[in-house]
Image (cartoon, rainbow, N blue to C red):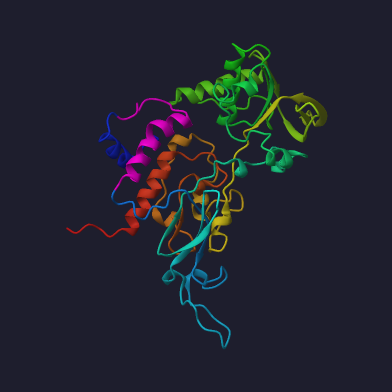
Amino acid sequence: MNMSEEAKLVLKELGPLPDEGAFPTGRELVDSYLAPLACVIQQSSNCEGLHFGTEVVTVGRGALLKSESIGGGDVQMPKGKPLCEKQRRETPFRLLVRHADVSGEERYLEGFDFVADCSGFYASNLSNWAGKGGTPALGERALRTANRLFTTIPDVLGIHRERFAGKKCLVVGAGMSAATTVRNLMELSKTERNTEVTFLTRSAGEPYSVIADDVLPQRKILSEISNRASKGEMPNVTYLGGAAISEIKQAADGRLRVAVEQSSDGSVESSAFEVDEVVCCVGYRPDTSIYEELQVHQCYASNGPMKLAATLIGGSGDCLAQVSAGVDVLKNPEPGFFILGGKSYGRKSSFLLKIGHDQVRTVLDSLLPAPAT
């Protein structure tokens, strides 16, 4: 599910493919699939147009402003001012890019007819806030700036082991990232004495819906383990359901003091406790600054492109039942601009890599001329 057919054809020339029946971690997917694929691309004779170590900061459309040529129509300029561009679709894109090295040098790349933003959203600066209502808890902004909080899944059993072994940790969230973290911490506690977990979710009761005949057994196991933890059936785990963080601050000894509000039977109780680490698995949001000067219709609920977001309303069922949208759904009011991959789902967490592969294939098929018969 996580490998495209095109990529497998390339990798077959290097040797055996990764085990298609395995359930890889992110690191395993990079090492066994993405890194070898990247090496092939870098060594290709057709890579002149690739710019490595380069970040796209902003995408614009020639001299056109965001408010001009709405829907691709003619630009109405005041008298006496030259008509710089006539229509958006006839105006090439220009990209402000920044080098990733210490120089941070910026420059413009111009002349693009189409742009696809596949930049994703899995980064610490794009994590949602852990406070009530999705707003920052008091002190959370400063602690995140200081890299004192985890906002992605920590490698509890690997490089981050020392930060969690024999320590007390707070895990916030009720998705599979939180479930994975709780599971790994429980595994760590088997060999590291005094390792403790406080598991906090917004909802009360069992936080996960278990699919009886789940075709992904690991997903079912994660859900069941976390539900058992919420009922107090797992050692070294304390569960706080119906709760929200109101404040996080660092004590003089370096530990984190967390203030929590917990709702029960219509009343709200406040409490506070100290932990060594806090892991915020509360989802992510897209960085829309890249295309803020383009005409992109965003969903008011998910921050994803509106046409696609309208097809994703609800989404409470099994994410494996999804099908990729057609090219018309992937289009934006900005002609020739596409948002593909995980970023296209905005804040929704149901995106699958196979959907991204289908999106890219669909858009490329619509742009490339049909082969001669």
Give percent across and percent down for residue 269.
Answer: 82, 29
When the figure is inspected, residue 288 is found, relative to residue 8, above or below; the finding is below
Can residue 184 be seen from the camera position used here?
A: yes
Q: Nearer the viewer, residue 110 or 126?
A: 110
The chief SS type of the magenta part is helix
Indicate the quadrant where residue 24 lies. top left
When the figure is inspected, residue 364 is found, relative to residue 157, above or below; the finding is below
Q: Nearer the viewer, residue 53 or 135?
A: 53
Indicate the quadrant where residue 256 lies. top right
Q: Residue furthest front?
A: 103
Q: Is residue 36 magenta?
A: yes
Give percent across and percent down for residue 108.
Answer: 49, 63
**Which corner quadrant holds the N terminus?**
top left
**Which corner quadrant holds the C terminus?**
bottom left
The residues colored magenta run: 17-44
Q: Residue furthest bottom?
A: 80
When the figure is inspected, residue 238 is found, relative to residue 25, above or below; the finding is above
Q: Nearer the viewer, residue 115 or 362?
A: 115
Give percent across and percent down for residue 164.
Answer: 64, 22
Can residue 323 be seen from the camera position used here?
A: no
User: In the figure, is residue 250 to the left or right of 210?
Assistant: right
Give percent across and percent down for residue 272.
Answer: 81, 27
User: In the figure, is residue 209 to the left or right of 43?
Assistant: right
Q: Residue at x 42, y 71 (%)?
A: 90
Q: Is residue 246 magenta?
A: no
Q: Residue at x 55, y 49 (%)?
A: 102
Indicate the quadrant where residue 257 lies. top right
Q: How many marks?
A: 0
User: In the figure, is residue 94 to the left or right of 174?
Assistant: left
When the figure is inspected, residue 25 is found, relative to residue 231, above or below; the finding is below
